Image: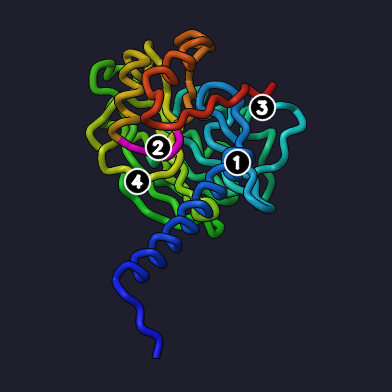
Amino acid sequence: MLKLDILSILFILFGLSALALADSNLDIKETIAKMHWFGQASFRIDNNDKYIYIDPFDLPEDSPVADIIFITHGHGDHLSADQIKKIIDKNTLIVGPASEEEQLTALEVPNLKLVKPFDTLEVKQIPVEVVPAYNIKKTKYHPRDNNWVGYILTINETKVYHAGDTERIPEMKKINCDIALIPLGQTYTMSSVKEAAEAIMDIKPKVAIPMHYGIYEGKSDDADKFQSYLNEKIDVVLLEMNK
């Protein structure tokens, strides 16, 4: 019978943990490589044969048809009927906040799922956690009572958190994710780039990706400032805006 001492067992466990971490990091890199950012909070994530959009805005004309569209709230740069109509067909599923039922129903899509904060569901084999998104200071822009949302999507074992339009809120400390897409704001969302960095330190993802800057609020170089705040604490990936 093979006998293993404590050191041998620890060595084996350490090796297995290292392999799992390497696989996890590879999954994260592959997920980021399949992300496309169109400005504001608009993303497309390509997942095998699925195209997943979040808050489609200013999309290229040749954008592929969506399998799933996630909407965080009702503002026109997040819920745009013109943009959504570019990328839907009879099989597209739209997921959006129940507070925007009227706008979403008007799109006349056959597949619509209305959600609220703290819902959990699975759509087309994608596990989804619905989380709150709101302002604490600038409450007129994104009131908590509107029940607008962010999402945590599990894509190929990688948890991607899209914060929606939000300030740094207490619920962020309970979010578990690998990648966090966070607004830099300064007018409608975060009050400062530093606040966005502090929100990331609350969340503690493996990778942070800034969004919602350089068009209607903030400056294009705010991402560099965000990266400097998180230097040697959290990896930051700056995506080029697709146009």
Vertical comparison of 26 with 220: above or below: below
Residue 46 quadrant: top right
Where does label 2 land, which residue? 150
> Residue shown at 40%/32% (left/top)?
234
Q: Along the polypeptide, which appears first: circle 1 or circle 3?
A: 1
Between marks 1 and 2, how big is the CA–CA gap? 16 Å
Look at discs 1 and 3 and give the one toward the viewer.
1
Between marks 2 and 3, how big is the CA–CA gap? 20 Å
In front here: 12 or 242? Answer: 12
Q: Residues within 10 Å of mark 1 (few under 14, many from 20)?
A: some
Q: Amino acid at mark 2?
A: Gly
Q: Along the polypeptide, which appears first: circle 1 or circle 2?
A: 1
Q: Along the polypeptide, which appears first: circle 1 or circle 4?
A: 1
Where does label 3 land, which residue? 59
Indicate the position of residue 94 as horizontal and vertical percent values.
54, 45
Q: Amino acid at mark 1?
A: Ile
Indicate the position of residue 144 as horizontal and vertical percent values.
27, 30
Between marks 4 and 3, how big is the CA–CA gap? 29 Å
Indicate the position of residue 140 as horizontal and vertical percent values.
29, 17
> Residue shown at 47%/28% (left/top)?
236
Between marks 1 and 4, how big is the CA–CA gap? 19 Å
Look at discs 1 and 4 and give the one toward the viewer.
4
Indicate the position of residue 56 as horizontal and vertical percent values.
58, 31
Where does label 1 land, which residue? 45
Q: Amino acid at mark 4?
A: Asn
